[in-house]
Amino acid sequence: MNPAIGAYILAVIFIGCGIFSIVAAIAGWEWFFNNMNVRVLTCRMKRSYARCLYFALGVAIIAMGCYMFITV
């Protein structure tokens, strides 16, 4: 596999994960925010702050994916 193709695949994965994070933040999925891995970051936050945090993380992850897509 060409390294550029691998970078494109990774960029698409990043963008997909960012979209998932934003959708979870907007929808307020109970199963997402009660997950042990999510509670590592949000254990001391109110739910509204946790949703804002995951929305911002989703935007940042999408930005990283777009940057990877553009620079390859």
Image (cartoon, rainbow, N blue to C red):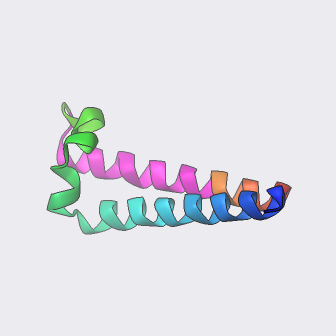
The answer to which image quadrant residue 53 occupies is top left
Would residue 9 be found to the left or right of residue 21 on screen?
A: right
What type of secondary structure mainly makes up the magenta span?
Answer: helix
The answer to which image quadrant residue 65 occupies is bottom right
Identify whether 39 is placed above or below 21: above
Image quarter in which the N terminus is found: bottom right
Along the viewing direction, whichever of 71 and 58 lies nearer the viewer: 71
Q: Is residue 53 magenta?
A: yes
Image quarter in which the C terminus is found: bottom right
Q: Which residues are magenta?
A: 45-63
Q: How many marks?
A: 0
Identify which residue is drawn at 28% across, 44% down.
Answer: 49
Q: Is residue 15 magenta?
A: no
The answer to which image quadrant residue 63 occupies is bottom right
Identify whether 51 is placed above or below 45: below
Identify which residue is drawn at 26% across, 33% down.
Answer: 40
Residue 70, horizontal then vertical, whole percent: 81, 61
Identify which residue is drawn at 27% across, 44% down.
Answer: 38
Residue 44, horizontal then vertical, whole percent: 19, 30
Would residue 52 be found to the left or right of residue 72 on screen?
A: left
Identify whether 17 is placed above or below 60: below
Identify whether 3 is placed above or below 9: above
